[in-house]
Each structure stands twice: as structure tokens, then as C-alpha cells.
Amino acid sequence: MIEQASYTIEPEPIDSPHAQQALREYVAELDRRFPSGFDTSRAAPPAKTDFVPPAGVFLVVRVGEQVLGCGALRTGPGGIGEIRRMWIAPELRGRGAGRALLTELEQEARRLGCDRIRLDTAAELREARALYDSAGYQEIPAYNDNEYARHWYEKTLS
């Protein structure tokens, strides 16, 4: 059992072994959950430099040395940030880690000068949609060409 306070959320270079491990797990889970699998090249793929300060940041969630989550933020024109690649391992879900990661990504967006934040998600990810709804995100029209997305969200940061 993993206790709520036992995880950490910290910036990590996206090309580090821990970040790459988290991204592999993220892709593997989506590949299992989506009816036709998951191909990152069809999901509005970001450039690696998008997640490097000052353009953005990549965060890793750990319990000890075990990588159990990740999330990325990239900044765009007009003070709009975008959350990408947010994932929490199944064994850490329901313990507040997803909400904590979302909050950290929002704080990073503020720090990088964003006043709004956007994200997209797939219809199959009902738990993600519930998190975004409960965190004050509002559904908006599609803003990208992510083939897997069926829901697009935005939140004004205070």
C-alpha cells in the first residue's frame, strides 16, 4: 500500500532515464486502453524542447526511487499553457497524486507566465475527465488535431 504523503513530484529532464521510463509506461497504458491501440505520432506530438525551461517543464512522480507518474507543461502564445502526457500508475491512483500533479503543473504554468491552461483527453479516460471537471476545467471546442482526443479543456489560472 502506498501512503498519500509518500510520493514526490519533481522536475526531470525529459530525456533522463526516469522520464523516459514514465513516458514508456504512459504509452503502454494508453495502448492497452484504446480500442485501436496508441501511436504517439497521431496524438499531436510535441517537440522535446517544449518541455525544457523556459518553454515548459516535465515532472516525474516517484515513490522512493520508483517512477509512478509524469506530466508535462508547454507554454504557448497569448499566455496559454498546455498540459501533456499526464499519467499516474494504477497503484498510485485514488491517493491524491493525480490532483497533486495537476496542481503542480498549474503552479509551473503560473511561474512561466501563463494565465490560462489547456489540455485534451480521450473518451476512454473517464477518471481523467472527472479530475479535470472537479479541478475547475471547462470543456471548450477542439484546439488541436490530436486524433485520440474527444474532450478539450481550459482553465483560467488565478
Image (cartoon, grey):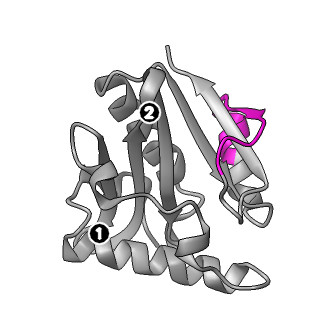
Q: Residues within 10 Å of mark 1 (few under 14, many from 20)?
A: many
Instruction: Judge left or right: residue 120 versus residue 123.
Output: left
Report the amino acid beneath label 2. Glu
Label 2: few (<14), some (14–19) or many (≥20) C-alpha neighbours in 10 Å? many
Residue 96 visible? The answer is no
The amino acid sitting under disc 1 is Ala
Whole-number angstrom distance, CA of label 1 to CA of label 2: 19 Å
Residue 156 against residue 71 in the figure, above or below: above
Identify the disc placed on residue 152: none
Q: Which residue is mark 2?
A: 106
* Residue 5 placement (x, y as % from top left): 36, 51
Q: Report the span colored magenta.
A: 131-144
Residue 58: x and y in percent read 31, 53
118 part of magenta stretch: no
Image point (71%, 80%), residue name:
33
Number of callouts = 2
Q: Which mark is residue 19?
A: 1
Above/below status of 5 relative to 142: below
Q: Earlier in the sequence, mark 1 or mark 2?
A: 1
Q: Quadrant of residue 29?
A: bottom right
Q: Residue at x 78, y 67 (%)?
A: 124
The kind of secondary structure element at disc 1 is helix
Q: Does residue 149 appear in the picture of this structure?
A: yes
- Which residue is found at the position 19% from the left and 71% from the top? 16
Residue 101 x, y percent position in the rendering? 44, 47
* Left or right: 10 in relation to 107: left
